Image: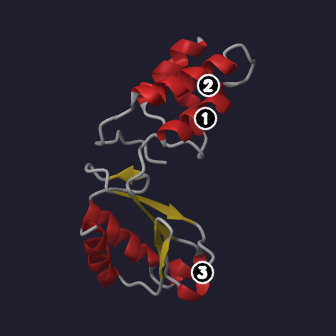
Amino acid sequence: MANKISPVPFNGTKEQEQKLLEVIAAHKDTQGALISVLQQAQDIYGYLPIEVQKIIAEKMGVPLEEVYGVVSFYAQFSLNPKGRYKISVCLGTACYVKGSGDVFDKLSRTLGISSGECTPDGRFSLEACRCVGACGLAPVMTVNDEVYGRLVPDDIDGILADYQAR
């Protein structure tokens, strides 16, 4: 998980906030409910920006430091939004040996973001994963549910251009 503050502004809606308040109200008096509330909040917003963490802390009567500590400790939680196009590069053994590290580096340089981050326009997010389950196509990356295999760094510009045009 990246610890860098996202350049993408928080755009929560009143409807999302109302859903969050309902979740909090349903769990407010339940001992140990913070993780459950955070999971549901992430389902509502897609990630857990500081604005959402502050609401949870205030309404549940939990210090913000505790909320942030839980969010930043568990890998299931994201501090950064996901892009419209979620790019995941497999860095598992088969893919890495065949050059997925170079593919990942090219994506990072081209998009100007690191793993766990989102481009400022909200179009792309980038993450590394351990296995896609397509070792025969190594190296592999996915964009949302689309799989790209046998990649080389020179393939990246064309793939990104295709998504830019959409």
- Mark 2 vs mark 1, CA separation in Å: 7 Å
The percent position of residue 117, horizontal first and vertical second, equals 38, 51
Label 1–label 3 contact, CB within 8 A: no
Q: Which element is circle 1 on?
A: helix
Task: Pick whichever, 85 or 35, lies toward us.
Answer: 85
- The residue to which callout 2 is attached is 23
Is residue 65 visible in the rendered image? The answer is no
Label 2–label 3 contact, CB within 8 A: no
- Looking at the image, is mark 2 or mark 1 earlier in the sequence? 2
Label 1 neighbour load within 10 Å: few <14, some 14-19, many 20+: some
Apparent side of residue 151 relative to residue 30 in the rendered image (left or right): left
Q: Is residue 86 above or below residue 60?
A: below
- The residue to which callout 1 is attached is 40
- Mark 2 vs mark 3, CA separation in Å: 38 Å
At 52% from the left and 84% from the top, the residue drawn is: 138
Residue 73, image quadrant:
top right
Disc 1 marks which amino acid?
Answer: Gln
- The residue to which callout 3 is attached is 134
